[in-house]
């Protein structure tokens, strides 16, 4: 992926751009979070002087990143998915990879749900015993 160090005049005229503050406000996150995603290679904004300049492509990548985060995906998997967005290859392999990632994540969440249900049942039993002991002492 080519690095976009500066924003050309042609690029600026062709599409809207966003500041870090605008994106942070739109997605209700901090500018620091956006810079973190840059450090992780999820975003590559251009520069205009010392300021970061985000394109609609960057905005979409941020949106996909936040969607992956909301799904609970690890950043490494989010990066793979976001990088697929930029790929010129056929969509079929990308969709299969996405389905595999989602299936794996679903399995993890189902296991966690099972573990939580077991723990809640244990808590319920302890509560029941405690209430019985309290009722017996009254």
Image: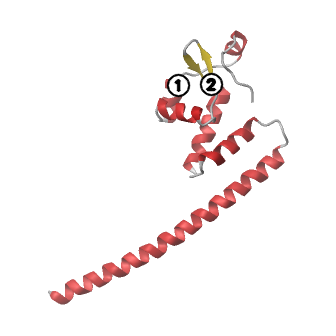
Image: 51 above or below 79:
above
Label 2 packing within 10 angstroms: few (<14), some (14-19), many (20+): many
Q: Which residue of the protein is positioned furthest toward the top in this rendering?
A: 9
Q: Name the residue located 16 percent from the left edge and 88 percent from the top edge.
A: 137
Does dot 1 land on a helix, a strand or a loop? helix
21 left or right, relative to 73: left
Q: Name the residue located 58 percent from the left edge and 33 percent from the top edge.
A: 39
- At which x and y percent is residue 136? 19, 89
Q: Which residue of the protein is positioned furthest toward the left in this rendering?
A: 138
Label 1 packing within 10 angstroms: few (<14), some (14-19), many (20+): some
- At which x and y percent is residue 130? 27, 81
Q: Name the residue located 81 percent from the left edge and 44 percent from the top edge.
A: 91
Q: Are marks 1 and 2 in contact (CB under 8 Å)?
A: yes
Q: Which residue of the protein is positioned furthest toward the right in this rendering?
A: 90
Residue linked to disc 2? 45
Residue 20 numbered tag: 1
104 left or right, relative to 32: right
Q: Name the residue located 82 percent from the left edge and 35 percent from the top edge.
A: 88
Task: Compare marks 1 and 2 and give the one earlier in the sequence.
Answer: 1
């Amino acid at each position: 992926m080519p690095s976009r160090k500066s924003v050309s005049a042609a690029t600026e005229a062709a599409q809207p751009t966003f500041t870090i503050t605008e994106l942070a406000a739109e997605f209700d996150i901090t500018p620091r979070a956006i810079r973190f995603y840059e450090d992780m290679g999820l975003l590559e904004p251009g520069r205009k002087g010392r300021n970061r300049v985000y394109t609609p492509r960057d905005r979409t990548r941020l949106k996909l990143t936040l969607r992956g985060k909301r799904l609970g995906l690890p950043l490494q998997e989010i990066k793979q998915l976001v990088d697929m967005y930029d790929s010129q290859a056929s969509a079929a392999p990308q969709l299969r990879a996405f389905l595999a990632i989602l299936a794996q994540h679903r399995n993890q969440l189902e296991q966690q749900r099972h573990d939580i249900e077991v723990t809640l049942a244990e808590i319920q039993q302890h509560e029941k015993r405690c209430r019985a002991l309290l009722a017996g002492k009254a």
